[in-house]
């Protein structure tokens, strides 16, 4: 037998997935968990999108596609970007690469842009993958604390910029906090990055999921939904999601199909940004992922024409319900998007978030401790991507847990 330990690289040893695995291991033991830990939509892929993938397979669209992605899908994405970012990404000189999910785009972007000695700014709390992909690429993560309102601002970022800073990982709406960056924050952060020669990687995988502030903001909660940006709060159609890509062409935009269309297993996303960088990412994709799945690319073109607003409205109502039920008992920054809330464990309970989550799990409620997403262990992430009955049950249990 070989000495298997010899084959495990330091690069991989450096990755610690124990926090989240513990929750999933506990979950596996529960008979009927109240699961508020899920990081994907609870709705299925729309019918026309499924049909398009099936037809594509039947018709033989089963071979490698061009590395950069199929022409029809690229064309549709380009049109969308031209409408949304006419001054920057939509000008016609940006690069575009269809990727295997946003994860694929993140991996390629980091391997392309950073190496040993480089620093990458990561707002804390952060999406779990960020810190590990940064270290995998050999660079050093530098955390920008955004507690307690989870707003990322130029002011909070600037003190962390050094000669070595290359990238800022920007994520709005955010996983795990659900906080949406304001138009002002996006503009100022874009200007700051330009001043210091820093590239912004804008992970906008939740771009369709963002909502105006709840009708009745609950009192103890801090409002972080971008209320000042809402031109017509009554309108069901929100204005454009604030993005640093609206203010600078030096932004690498990463978007995906996983969340918007419930296509998490289909592995489809795209990266758009400075052509010189996207070209290098394309070269790397050619020798790694090769291409995004062919049938998913065909179906992705169809998906871009599907109206998902009912699902978005349903998540908005669930968000309102979370705020309504929890804000009298917990401190929480009102989430403006995605399908998460990042809730503070009441101090008077004297528990770390991990201990609090263990108590919740003992009662059959699954949530994720903040330590998985943060250097702190004071909050937990709740996902409301579940049916209303389960959400109500979970919220009821959280109210009980807050009482101690
Ligand atoms: N970024 C964020 C912030 C996410 O939450 C996720 C999925 N959990 C991803 C990227 C990866 O998504 P994909 O399925 O497109 O790889």
Image (tube, rainbow, N blue to C red):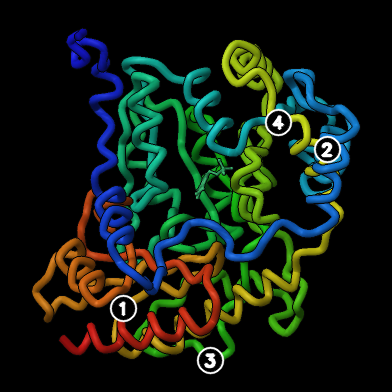
Pair 4/3: label in front: 4
| Front-most of residues 145 and 101 | 101
Q: Residues within 10 Å of mark 3 (few under 14, many from 20)?
A: few
Q: Is mark 4 within 8 Å of ligand 1?
A: no
Q: Is residue 75 left or right of residue 179?
A: right
Q: Residues within 10 Å of mark 4 (few under 14, many from 20)?
A: many
Q: Is residue 234 left or right of residue 132?
A: right
| Front-most of residues 205 and 119 | 205
Q: From this view, report whether residue 117 is shown above or below residue 266.
A: above
Label 2 vs 1, first from the N-terminus:
2
User: Mark 2 = which residue?
Assistant: 298
Q: Which mark is residue 216?
A: 3
Q: Are the residues flagged by discs 2 and 1 in contact, CB closer than 8 Å? A: no
Whole-angstrom CA distance, mark 4 to mark 1, is 42 Å
Residue located 21% across and 72% down the image: 362
Q: Which x, y percent locates residue 197?
A: 50, 26
Q: Residues within 10 Å of mark 2 (few under 14, many from 20)?
A: many
Label 4 vs 3, first from the N-terminus:
3
Tell me the element at label 2: helix
Q: Which quadrant of the rendered structure holds the N terminus? A: top left
| Front-most of residues 75 and 149 | 75
Q: From this view, report whether residue 195 is shown above or below residue 143.
A: above
């Amino acid at each position: 037998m070989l000495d298997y330990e010899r084959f495990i690289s330091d690069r991989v040893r450096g990755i610690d997935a124990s926090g989240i695995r513990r929750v999933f291991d506990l979950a596996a033991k529960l008979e009927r968990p109240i699961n508020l830990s899920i990081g994907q939509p609870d709705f299925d892929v729309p019918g026309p999108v499924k049909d398009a993938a099936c037809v594509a397979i039947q018709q033989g669209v089963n071979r490698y596609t061009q590395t950069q992605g199929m022409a029809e899908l690229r064309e549709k994405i380009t049109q969308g970007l031209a409408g949304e970012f006419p001054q920057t990404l939509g000008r016609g000189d940006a690069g575009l690469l269809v990727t295997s999910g946003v994860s694929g785009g993140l991996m390629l972007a980091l391997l392309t842009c950073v190496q040993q000695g480089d620093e990458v700014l990561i707002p804390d709390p952060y999406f779990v993958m960020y810190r590990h992909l940064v270290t995998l690429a050999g660079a050093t993560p530098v955390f920008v604390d955004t507690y307690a309102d989870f707003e990322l601002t130029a002011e909070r970022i600037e003190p962390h910029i050094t000669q070595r800073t290359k990238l800022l990982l920007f994520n709005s709406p955010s996983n795990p906090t659900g906080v949406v960056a304001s138009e002002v924050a996006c503009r100022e952060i874009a200007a700051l990055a330009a001043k210091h020669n820093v590239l912004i990687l804008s992970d906008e995988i939740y771009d369709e999921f963002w909502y105006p502030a709840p009708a009745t903001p609950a009192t103890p909660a801090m409002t972080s939904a971008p209320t000042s940006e809402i031109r017509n709060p009554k309108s069901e159609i929100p204005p454009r999601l604030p993005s640093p890509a609206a203010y600078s062409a030096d932004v690498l935009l990463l978007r995906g199909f996983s969340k918007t269309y419930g296509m998490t297993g289909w592995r489809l996303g795209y990266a758009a940004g400075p052509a010189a960088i996207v070209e290098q990412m394309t070269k790397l994709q050619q020798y790694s992922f090769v291409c995004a799945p062919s049938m998913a690319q065909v179906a992705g073109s169809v998906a871009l024409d599907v109206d998902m607003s009912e699902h978005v409205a349903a998540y908005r109502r669930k968000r309102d319900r979370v705020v309504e039920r929890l804000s009298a008992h917990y401190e929480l920054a009102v989430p403006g998007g995605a399908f998460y809330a990042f809730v503070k464990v009441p101090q008077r309970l004297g528990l770390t978030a991990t201990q609090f989550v263990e108590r919740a799990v003992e009662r059959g409620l699954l949530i994720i401790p903040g330590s998985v997403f943060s250097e702190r262990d004071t909050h937990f992430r709740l996902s409301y991507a579940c049916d209303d009955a389960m959400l109500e049950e979970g919220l009821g249990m959280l109210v009980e847990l807050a009482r101690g």
